[in-house]
Image (tube, rainbow, N blue to C red):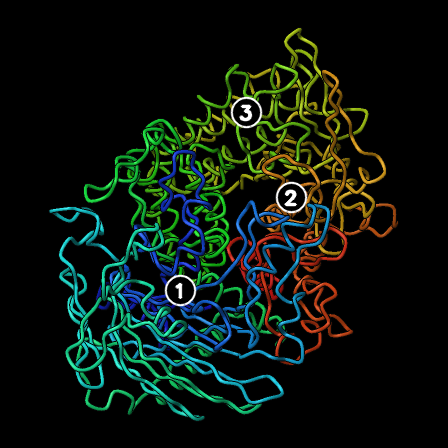
Amino acid sequence: MADKRAGTSETAEQERLAAHRSRRANWKNWGPYLSDRAWGTVREDYSPGGTAWEYFPHDHARSRAYRWGEDGIGGFSDRYQHLCMSVALWNGRDPILKERFFGLTGSEGNHGEDVKEYYYYLDATPTHSYNRMLYKYPQAEFPYGDLVAENSRREPTDAEYELFDTGVFNENRYFDVEIEYAKAGEEDVLGRITITNRGPEPEACHILPMLWFRNTWDWGYEAGPLGETPTKPIMTIEGNGVRAEHPSQHTGTYFWYVEATGSTDTGGTLMATENETNPAIFSAPSPEGGRFKDGFHQALVHGAETVDTGEGATGTKVTAVHRVQLDPGASAVIHTRLSRTPHKAPFREQAAVFTARRSEADAFYAEIQTPGISDDEKNIQRQAFAGLLWSKQLFYYDVEQWLDGDPGQPAPPPQRKHGRNAGWRHLSNFDIISMPDAWEYPWYASWDLAFHCLPLAQIDSDFAKRQLTVMTREWYTHPNGQLPAYEWSFNDVNPPVHAWAAWRVFKIDRKRTGIGDHAFLEDVFHKLLLNFTWWVNRKDPEERNIFEGGFLGLDNISVFDRSSELPTGGHIQQSDGTAWMGFYSLMMLKIALELAEQNPTYQNIASKFFEHFLRIAEAMTADRREGPGLWDDEDGFFYDSLHLPDGTVFPLRVRSLVGLMPLMAVETLEPDLLQRLPVFQRRMEWFYSNKVYLKEQGHLACTITPGVGERRLLSLVNEDRLKQIVKYLLNESEFLSEYGIRSVSKYHRENPYHFDVAGERFTVSYQPAESESGMFGGNSNWRGPIWFPINYLLIEALQRFHHYYGDRMQVEFPTGSGHMITLDTAAAELSRRLTKIFRRNAEGRRPVFSDNETFQTDQRWKDYVPFHEYFHGETGAGIGSSHQTGWTALVAKLIQQSGGSQ
């Protein structure tokens, strides 16, 4: 692809991105920055015991003002989330106004938290010049009570009870609600809500486009801290529109308009209430004539006089209720416009703007998508990108304010001072961040975010780089160097994938533009030096380059909870933990060598990480280590090693991803690069000449140089061990599924691993879907399913091994078949199996949908693709969070690669 920064023939969306990058325009000021769920989060939890789900439940959300953020269906806001838009609905039967998506809490669901709605993010551009989503709203009363009661009754071994199972979609008795946004300008946002009756009989529905201010005034501040504005804003109904005035210099004044077209409409009267807590939810009396956050709900559902209407009515939350009567197949359309300037005819250009922006979105993706991929793959990829872009949200969390409480509110419980996140007072988050899932995980997770950035870099490398950079800023990273994990516990330890993501984003951006952003790479690298030191100091307590303790991404794959005190006493030396650090060392080495070509002084830092890797490799793989190592010669596999207090050492013989992780730590050093970096080359040769464990060239790291001038391989496995591990990896009776690599070997289905201690038995068995283990709150979902991020890393590892060994290394695929292929071809086949989860097969079915016939065959469902958290190890069915177009959006990158790109 041509350099779109320097070249010509840019698409309109690329021009907008360029204008935003150069600060000539602020095209990203408005976007889908509201969460899908703000209730039940840590930020809103002020309970003594940290019970976030119970402290702020769904039943409070309609009546209680949020402190830290807002949510809504199809939400859109400015980047400070001062002014917000979303859509509410009422079918005339529900007990509450549908203002946000419903789901079960972690304690209510028999498989953990779970959204119980069907909605799809269908399109989006990086500047949000065009966004489109679809929500399927039942016409029958929404079965809130039934969903809670039935899922509570079911055991963890039972299937989840989903909304579809309740029967509310029988005979297609639902409304399709399509929500679109198109920008006429940077500060001019058009909205279009199209509602269609898919049922067999005429049905009515109320549609409420809403505009409101986030509550920044009720917390008692005299001077506004970050994101807070103590002066109350105001919305005023003026003629056929609303004037919204906010005291912040970032926001100021906007004008909002609403209009309905299509089938019979009644209503449309503008009404106002306040985005403030109704004290009635705390059993306190509501003031006479009070206007609160639930004012529209009370007025519509209960007929209460809780809103103001007419010229001059004011509030901080407004809507216009439209009741539409729709025949089967008929549609109605509600138009909105939010603009800096008033309009006498606000909807005159509505159709033209939407047509133009949708066409520009098509052109933008046509430039990006690899020629030759199928229409079905283009649809999957575009929805993956849309999910990523719709899942951006303002993440606001000032831990110091949260710990100390607000001056205008009751003081937090004293337990807060020593409880969750008490050691992170420095952390102050107020940024647009990519969420793993805006409902089930409406908070960032640092290692998830690293994976998000690869597909993001394909469409908006500036945003991808910003995501990686901001996590290393001093107001995020702990002073000791630890990156924050996630709001439930910033202290938890995520796998160190940040350097890898920075390197990959740098390369993707350079290939796309022809320009290497070394300033970005250098910035991240310097901050990661501190983080790397934290890992070495905190996770290698015996200073032997073997890492242990803490959550390393795969903890619930293990026999024991490795984050907690072991029932046996002693400690576990971790195969995966040590492999992650070898991987981290190599990524820092690659970055340092790249920077050294711009600044030769980085050669010395590169030497440091070269030595780090060699010491980790020697400690993990060489026979010279004292006691049993992590490599098992009998099985030809890596295992965790349990060290008991009496000095006894046991290998924990679980065949899982733990033993495959050493494959990740592999890189090559090209001869031309070494020639350009003589200081580093001399240092490297000194190691080879003077270190005994490198001279032996036994099981260590494959650092053999076949001949002068040839590339060098740095790896935790030599050729012989690589072949032994790959036999497990590509064995369909072990790890290889028709849909990717399983997290636990299928061998353990018939041969569970048991460890007995103090009269208690600990077991790991192959479970292709959700685990039956009670570890980690009963959601130990790494006991067999397929996970995209680890699969992606394994694919890249095979490609790097192929780069070194070339066609001379052939492996059986699958193991035992006699069919020999190269490692590169094996990587391509794994990629094909992963994308097959989403693609229609020869029978027109998508494995992700499992056996739901409506999803598989109905024209109004079958091409709307969900992106789950993980996938069934046998069938490829989607499991867990259903909108995790965070790391599962890596499918977009795999599809792109299948056409030979990047």
In the rendered view, tell whether residue 677 sits above or below residue 289: above
Tag 2 secondary structure: loop
Q: Position of residue 519 (x, y in %)?
A: 31, 47
Question: Dividing the picture into quarters, in which one does residue 107 lie?
Answer: top right
Which residue is the site of mark 2? 781
Residue at (37, 65) in percent of width and height: 32
Q: Is residue 506 visible?
A: no
Tag 1 secondary structure: loop
Direction top: furthest residue: 646
Which residue is the site of mark 3? 549
Give the residue type that dot 2 points to: Asn
Residue at (50, 43) in percent of width and height: 672
Does 670 sit left or right of 623 as displayed? Answer: left
Residue at (58, 34) in percent of width and height: 714
Which residue is the site of mark 1? 72
| Mark pair 2, 3: CA separation | 20 Å
